[in-house]
Image (cartoon, grey):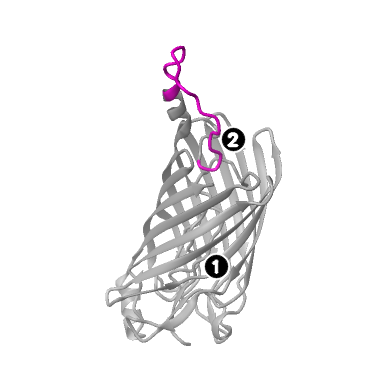
Amino acid sequence: MNKTIYTVVMTLLTMTYGYSQCACCAGAGTGSSNGDYNNGILTLPKNKWVAETYADYRTINQSNTVATAKADEEETPLKNMLITSFGVRYGLTNTITISALIPYVFLHTDTGNDSGLGDLVVMSTFNVLNKNNFSLALQAGLELPTGTQKSSAFDNTTVVVGSGSYDPMVGIIVAKRWDKYTLQANGLYKQTTKGFHDNYYGSIAIQNVTLNYRILGAKTSCALMPTEETDKPTESTPDATTKTTSANLSWSVFGGYYGEWLDNIKEEDVVDDNSGYYLGYATLGTTLSYKTWSFPLTASLPIIQNMNGDQNNGGFRIRLGIIKSF
């Protein structure tokens, strides 16, 4: 079996985390999301634009057994990775939002570093129900093979940043809003097809649930739904400026669980027994929004790690986003 350093970077319209542990499948299922608001707003208003960028740092806990096996195979284990991404979203109608996101990946090992452009993901979200503060949306998308394949800069293997395949995705999101709380959950599945050299890099299924608590700000005070009206201070309302500032500023905290299943990788029609997993993470984060800007910060810790064969476990990860609406 050809040894490859395999990194697939995909976007899910959810708070998507998860990656494997060795360089051959370290990036499978990694991604940036545009669901960091966790405020139950599943689609954008008509003609609304959103630009977003993320920096996602992820560590890997290396074991001596796996490290020795990889050294014998002349394959360097991945130590950590940084995934940067840029995306845009557009409200086609009040109930349909389209989006696109593309990542650039930085890989780090003990013997050197490498980087490359990942796969472009396009997605549509359809809000099919919005009643009594309950929302239901369906998703459909496609991962496009814009990622590159090249010789590794740190060993004799091949770095594949992407999959080389056209992979369809379907998903569902539900959200329930109360006065200060929002409960949001979703599931998404990506059917991976044959990519570079007819290799199969594993289909993915994810699950995510998040409870958000709004500490400060009005219900619509976020970058997606900026307050249009502003109060001007007068002699009779000297505190109007303070009220306006408060209305423009929003702060929330959230916590939840994220799970991801990755199928075994198959190269040259041979299944790699040391690939595939189910990973579960506890997530905790906060989002600060001011006018049309939002800054989500999320930390994740692994709590379930069911790895197939000999694989290193995932470590902690931190992600910061910058989001602007127009």
State how many labels appear.
2
Secondary structure beneath label 2 = strand
Give the residue type at disc 2.
Arg
Can residue 6 be seen by looking at this rendering?
Answer: yes
Q: Tell which of 240 and 128 is nearer to you.
A: 240
User: In which quadrant of the rendered view does residue 121 lie?
Assistant: bottom right
Placement of 164 over or under 320, stated as above or below: below
| Residue at (49% x, 42% y) in the render | 292
Q: Is residue 20 visible?
A: no
Q: Which mark is residue 195?
A: none
Q: Residues within 10 Å of mark 1 (few under 14, many from 20)?
A: many
Residue drawn at point x = 42 percent, y = 62 percent = 84
- Horizontal relation, residue 265 to residue 295: left or right: right
Magenta region, residue range: 223-241
Question: Which residue is found at the position 57% from the left and 50% from the top?
Answer: 49
What is the quadrant of residue 288 in the picture?
A: top left
**132 sits left or right of 17 in the view:** right
Q: Which x, y percent locates residue 223?
A: 50, 42
Which residue is tagged 1?
Answer: 120
Could you tell me how far apart the alpha carbons at marks 2 and 1 are, in whole angstroms? 32 Å
Is tag 2's residue or tag 1's residue first in the polypeptide sequence? Answer: 1
Q: Are marks 2 and 1 in contact (CB under 8 Å)?
A: no
Residue 242 % position (x, y):
41, 24
Disc 2 target residue? 177
Q: Please, is residue 19 above or below residue 112 in the view?
A: above
Amino acid type at mark 1: Leu
